[in-house]
Image (cartoon, rainbow, N blue to C red):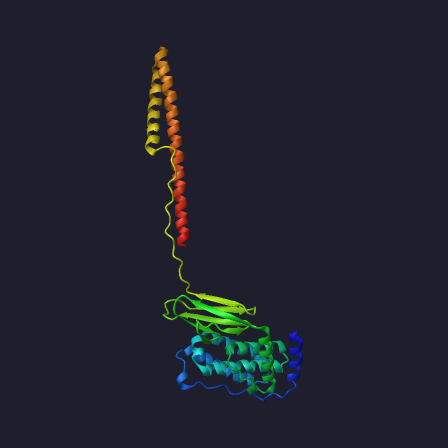
Amino acid sequence: MLAPILTYTLAGLLLAPAPSGAPPPPELIADEQPQSPKFTAALEHLAQVDTEISRTEDPLASADALIEALAALTNYAPEVAASPSARDLRQLARLNLARTYMLAGKDDLAIETMDETIREAMGDEVNAGMFGPSLSDLYQQRMAALDERGRATLVVTCARPCRVYINETAAAPDEPPSLPLGSYRVWIEDATEDLPRRRVLVNLSEAEQVYEVDYAPLPVPEAPAKPEPKPDRIMPRGAELALIVLGAGLTATGAVLVAGNKHLQVGPMIGGVLGLAVGAGMLTSGSIALTVDERKLARGTSHQATLSWNMRF
């Protein structure tokens, strides 16, 4: 419902006279000079590109370069948060980009850029009036549209002292802000610098919802591993070995009696056959019992080792 109204309004805004050039970018105050040479270079590059897009005959052709220069500042959240003049420069460059899209008839891009400008301000005033009534009216319209969509809460939970920056603006972890819907850059760093920082893009897509980001969550204490119960044996290992030895002995004795009974005497023949039968039975029983028990023990040991590895992982 909002899109047709905004398109019509933007068409009317383009009829209003636009200023001949964008305001000059703010200069960095001496006591705000960042310590990082890379951050200083990023600011200087942004100021240069912002000035060029205001002076060129085809500003739209330089829009991508300005977008890249603005994106480079997101790599220096603590420095941007500590420098009001850096944030002013960023805001003016963003407004200059929105004005460029307006003059080129790129209404959707102008709206998108103005919405990002409002989210980056994190509740502060946006000086859109510096660029004339057209951009100021667009700012008012987008503020009303974002208010109509509603707000969501962004909660950052730290398990240890941390510093939080949302859209390169310092935020208190214990004071979750209520923000217009849209995407927000979250930068979290350990106050002791023992842990690596975390950067995440959070999309607040539904009003009246709470979106959470965790940093350095408390480790879950590992419960002591319970020893695996020993598998039940068919019989003690000693008994199994005794059966095998006795069975082998009886089998050998029976074989000797049968083989030595050349005259086929009944007594030795019966003794030999019984020795062979009983010995073979004992040997087979002991071997089977020992094999089954050893395999059960091996399976139990393998399972315990795998479980321990998974828990450590």
Quarter containing the N terminus: bottom right
Residue 63 falls in which quadrant of the image?
bottom right
Q: Residue visible at 39% across and 50% down?
A: 308
Where in the figure is residue 178, as x and y percent of width and height?
51, 73
Q: Closer to the camera, 146 or 37?
A: 146
Where in the figure is residue 193, as x and y percent of width and height?
37, 69
Judge whether 169 appears above or below 237 on screen: below
Where in the figure is residue 12, as x and y percent of width and height?
66, 83
Q: Residue visible at 41% across and 52% down?
A: 311
Q: Residue visible at 50% across and 75% down?
A: 71
Residue 275 falls in which quadrant of the image?
top left
How many marks the image carries: the answer is: 0
Left/right of residue 10 with respect to residue 177 in the rendered view? right
Quarter containing the C terminus: bottom left
Q: Is residue 76 visible?
A: no
Where in the figure is residue 134, as x and y percent of width and height?
61, 85
Q: Is residue 73 visible?
A: yes
Q: Residue visible at 54% across and 80% down?
A: 94
Judge whether 200 appears above or below 261 on screen: below
Q: Closer to the camera, 176 or 45?
A: 176
